[in-house]
Amino acid sequence: QVQVVESGGGLVQPGESLKLSCVASGRIFKIGAMGWHRQAAGKERELVASWELRGGTYYADSVKGRFTISPDTAKKTVSLQMNNLKSDDTAVYFCDVFVTELLGGSVVNYWGQGTQVTVSS
């Protein structure tokens, strides 16, 4: 079993920065991808940024130039640096990881419980 835990959310004013962190623990042989998603009240969950071992990084158009995803597969962590935050960035942010638990095993997707980010003056 694998556990995924996010941290770093909070209340900030527009224009400020915030860094989210995510750590995966448990039986992990290899991490193939890590990502950050968000879900605002009344809206569907959307992919914000992701990293894939064989596919590089992806950013949603709404965060390009402001957010930076930084994976560290050795430490099993991924962070999301968020700069110049806007009120539209307010949401619960979720981290997910795709892991292989055993050599030759299948890839499994695990999610964290989420951390609230509120951008308001």
Image (cartoon, grey):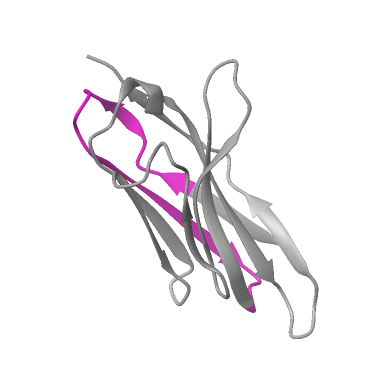
* Left or right of 64 on screen, residue 106: right
Residue 81 location (% of width, % of height) = 31, 49
Q: Position of residue 110 (x, y in %)?
A: 67, 54
- The residue positioned 58% from the left and 39% from the top of the image is 113
Which of these two is toward me, 3 or 99? 99
| Residue 38 in the figure: left or right of residue 75 | right
| Part of the protein shown in magenta | 6-29
Q: Quadrant of residue 118?
A: top left
**Residue 39 drawn in magenta:** no
Rendered position, 3 above or below 116: below
Residue at (28%, 17%) from the top-left corner? 120
* Magenta segment includes 18: yes
Q: x%, y% of residue 60? A: 47, 44
**Residue 101: x %, y % from top left:** 71, 73
> From the viewer's perspective, is 57 left or right of 54?
left
Q: Residue at x 29, y 44 (%)?
A: 66
Quadrant where the image shows the N terminus: bottom right
Front position in the image: 115 or 121: 121
Quadrant where the C terminus is found in the figure: top left
